[in-house]
Image: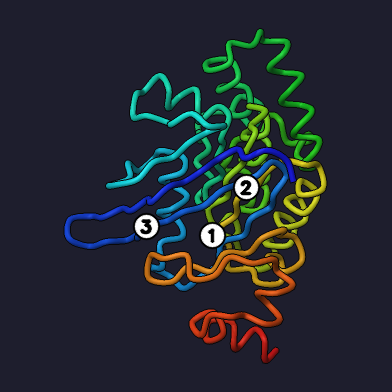
Amino acid sequence: MGATVISIKDLSKSFGKHEVLRKIDMEVKEGEIICIVGSSGSGKSTLLRCINKLERQTTGNIFFRGKEVRDVQREVNEYRAKVGMVFQSFNLFNNMTVLQNCMLCTRKVLHLSKEEAFDRAITHLKEVGMAPFINAKPDQLSGGQKQRVAIARALCMKPEVLLFDEPTSALDPEMVGEVLNVMKELATTGLTMIIVTHEMAFARDVSTRTIFMDRGYVAEDAPPSELFSNPKNPRTREFLSRYLAG
């Protein structure tokens, strides 16, 4: 793997008296595909939202290529252009077409020309199989199609790291495969990815590292071949027991 892209030191997050994340230490290197698994309420999505600065950590530090990401809006905007995020609820603008959704941020944030933004949008919509739908509005699309558009929109920013927050959890079962297939293809391109998922087979087959979170802690962090075949932590074994039995 390459250089360290994101480094997290002693990160904790509380909502009032409820501590959701506890003393997280984590490094993400170029080209890694990290899948984060765990029970609901274990802190997975909150960790992702802290990494993307959608939530402000209570204690600890986040570094991007060695520089701390401070809570200064200008710096946060620059950081988010490099560390993109795909949400479980798509977050598309319903009053815009597929093409407009994909062009908006590159025009507003990266200040690309209309022609450059169009070319980039078409390239990534083709990549996810959504180029035929450029003039459609989100409410004309299936959930799987919306999520593929959301992935294309994130790719248009040319991120160095792409975060996925349970990207298939809002989809009907028959639509999950089409989104996972797009993500599998992305995993072969060298893009650094951090994926919160409940799709255990996907995590086993695609990740280079799998992290199991429990009660706000990183309970286990190992290659998938180790974590899925011989988990060291009793809580990991308990969580994976039904999957391992299958």
**Proximity of marks 1 and 2: CB atoms separated by less than 8 Å:** yes
> At 58% from the left edge and 50% from the top edge, which residue is drawn?
164
Between disc 1 and disc 3, whose residue precedes? 3
Question: What's the amino acid at mark 3?
Answer: Lys
Mark 2 surroundings within 10 Å by alpha-carbon count, few (fewer than 14), some (14 through 19), many (20 or more): many
**Most extreme residue toward the top, as rendered?**
113
Q: Does label 1 or label 2 sit earlier along the sequence?
A: 2
Residue 193's spot in the image, x, y percent? 65, 47
Q: Residue at x 52, y 86 (%)?
A: 238
Relative to 213, 101 lies left or right? right
Residue located at (58% from left, 65% from top): 221
Amino acid residing under circle 2: Gln
Label 3 sits on a secondary structure element that is strand
x and y percentages locating residue 103 in the rendered image: 62, 22
Place residue 173 in its image quadrant: bottom right
Q: Are marks 2 and 3 in contact (CB under 8 Å)?
A: no
View extreme (left): residue: 17
Which part of the image, by quadrant, shows the C terminus? bottom right
**In the displayed structure, would residue 144 be above or below residue 240?**
above
Q: Position of residue 147 (x, y in %)?
A: 62, 47
Which residue appears at 43% of the width and 47% of the height? 9
In depth, the one of 156 and 161 nearer the eye is 161
Image: 23 above or below 138: below
Residue bearing the label numbered 3: 23
The mark closer to the camera, 1 or 3, is 3
Work out how far the residue at label 1 is from the one at label 2, CA to CA, in angstroms.
10 Å
Residue under pointer 2? 147
Residue under label 1, please give it: 170
Frontmost residue, 50 versus 110: 50
Seen in the picture, residue 162 relative to 123 is either above or below; the reply is: below
- Mark 1 belongs to which amino acid? Ala
Give the foreground label among 2 and 3.
3
